[in-house]
Amino acid sequence: MLVIDQRMNMKKPGYLFILILLLSSCYNTHDGNKIPKPDDLIDRDKLVLVITDMEIAESTIREKQNLGQEIDGLQEEYYLAIFEKHQITKEQFDNSMVYYKQDLDELNDIYEEVITRLSMMESEVEHE
């Protein structure tokens, strides 16, 4: 299993929140065509864990890139490991995200939990 180093740079979780708000604002949620709940919807708590791991992976990739290391294919490798860890598929994740994007308040709450988890992890790493 792929192990992601928790000592990477997680100093700006607020940027993640702003990015999500910007991306969410581009998504049309008021067209009256609500997407039905997928049969294999990832529950909210599990989705928080998955997105947290994805943000750690993204941070690790950015750190490697800043150090001049080769990162081609690294995101896909990390994401596949994350999907395997959480026993989900990419399609299941994508379908769940499309569904959750219909309720921006819910999606915002999910990302607030992700930010809280990342902040707690950062604090733990700093105190080691």
Image (cartoon, grey):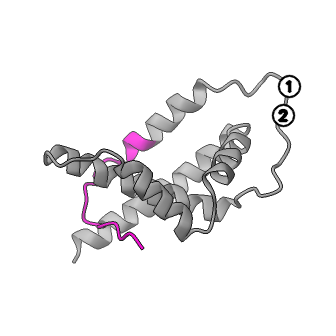
Quadrant housing residue 115: bottom left
Look at mark 1 in the image and give the residue it sits on: 32
Q: Is residue 117 above or below residue 30?
A: below
Please state which amino acid type lies under the numbered disc 1: Gly
Determine the residue positioned at 25% across, 59% down: 8
Q: Are marks 1 and 2 in contact (CB under 8 Å)?
A: yes
Element carrying mark 2: loop
In the picture, measured across the screen, residue 73 lies left or right of residue 62, that is right
Q: Main secondary structure of the magenta part?
A: loop
Quadrant housing residue 68: top left
Mark 1 and mark 2: span between their CA atoms?
Answer: 6 Å
In the picture, measured across the screen, residue 31 lies left or right of residue 98, that is right
Q: Position of residue 95 (x, y in %)?
A: 70, 46
Mark 2 Cα shell of 10 Å, populated few (<14), some (14-19), many (≥20): few
Q: Quadrant of the C terminus?
A: bottom left
Q: Is residue 53 above or below residue 99?
A: below
Q: Is residue 47 above or below residue 14?
A: below
Q: Is residue 1 visible?
A: yes
Q: Which residues are magenta?
A: 1-16
> Which dot marks residue 34?
2
In this view of the protein, which residue sits in the foreground, 22 or 73?
73
Determine the residue positioned at 57% across, 59% down: 48
Mark 1 Cα shell of 10 Å, populated few (<14), some (14-19), many (≥20): few
Q: Residue furthest front?
A: 73
Q: Is residue 71 above or below residue 124?
A: above
Q: Position of residue 13 (x, y in %)?
A: 38, 49
Please state which amino acid type lies under the numbered disc 2: Lys
